[in-house]
């Protein structure tokens, strides 16, 4: 016999010894950044971001989370209009080198995005400059809240955005959903 002796055991189709099954949700729940969240929420997609973990820890309400996510979406669209790199780059697309989304966007759509973003930004500014900065840092850039002053500014700015976007301020978490947080009306 030449070479190493063959290990005994069940095999996959490619000839490799069959690996033990790992539940992907349990693997995600054990990640270090999700440990600060209650065990029942660790598998949820919102636990993957600092802003989502703030909602799961009840630092902000589900309505404030929804307003922050809408504002973050507007910010990414606004960046695309002006060819600013996204604050959340996912991966480099080598097939689109030198080509920007802004040049492909119809001018009417670009004007509408700018108008919607500016209105939301000005609404957030009504709560103060510190609130604007807190919303940008937490909702858009997904940074941690580092002081009580920043937390209060974040809440004030998100409350203004709730009214701006027309979100029901009494949204609650649906604890029965295991695929993520489903926001339902409380009425």
Image: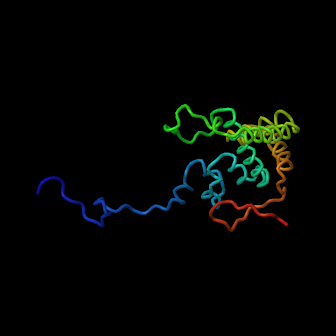
Please tell me which residue is depicted at 51% across the width and 59% down the height of the picture: 24
Q: How many marks?
A: 0
Please provide percent x and percent y for residue 62. 76, 55
Instruction: Tell which of 29 and 140 is nearer to you.
Output: 140
On the image, which quarter does residue 40 sit in?
bottom right
Q: Nearer the viewer, residue 171 or 31?
A: 171
Q: Nearer the viewer, residue 103 or 89?
A: 103
Tell which residue pokes out farthest to the right in this image: 126
Q: Which image quadrant for residue 71?
A: top right
- Please name whichever residue, 64 or 118, is drawn nearer the observer in this view of the structure: 118
Query: Residue 64 at what x, y percent from top left?
Result: 79, 50
Q: Position of residue 131 (x, y in %)?
A: 82, 37
Query: Considering only vertical position in the picture, is 89 above or below 46?
Result: above
Is residue 31 depicted above or below 134 in this figure?
below
Q: Quadrant of the C terminus?
A: bottom right
Q: How is the image coloured?
A: rainbow
* Picture coordinates of residue 117, whole percent (x, y): 78, 40
Return the residue found at the far left. 1
In the image: residue 38, left or right of residue 166 = left
Q: Residue at x 86, y 45 (%)?
A: 160
Report the quarter where the N terminus lies. Answer: bottom left
Residue 7 in which image quadrant: bottom left
């Amino acid at each position: 016999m030449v070479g190493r002796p063959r290990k005994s055991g069940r095999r996959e189709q490619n000839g490799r010894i069959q690996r033990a099954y790992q539940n992907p949700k349990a693997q995600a729940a054990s990640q270090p950044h999700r440990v600060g969240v209650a065990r029942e929420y660790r598998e949820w997609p919102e636990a993957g971001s600092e802003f989502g973990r703030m909602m799961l820890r009840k630092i902000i309400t589900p309505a404030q989370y929804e307003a922050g996510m809408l504002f973050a979406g507007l910010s990414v669209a606004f960046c695309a209009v002006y060819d600013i790199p996204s604050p959340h780059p996912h991966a480099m697309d080598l097939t689109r080198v030198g080509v920007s989304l802004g040049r492909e966007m119809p001018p009417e759509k670009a004007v509408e995005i700018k108008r919607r973003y500016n209105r939301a930004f000005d609404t957030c500014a009504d709560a103060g400059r510190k609130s604007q900065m807190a919303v940008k840092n937490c909702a858009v850039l997904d940074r941690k809240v580092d002081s009580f002053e920043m937390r209060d500014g974040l809440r004030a700015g998100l409350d203004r955005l709730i009214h701006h976007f027309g979100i029901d301020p009494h949204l609650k978490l649906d604890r029965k959903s295991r695929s993520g947080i489903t926001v339902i009306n409380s009425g």
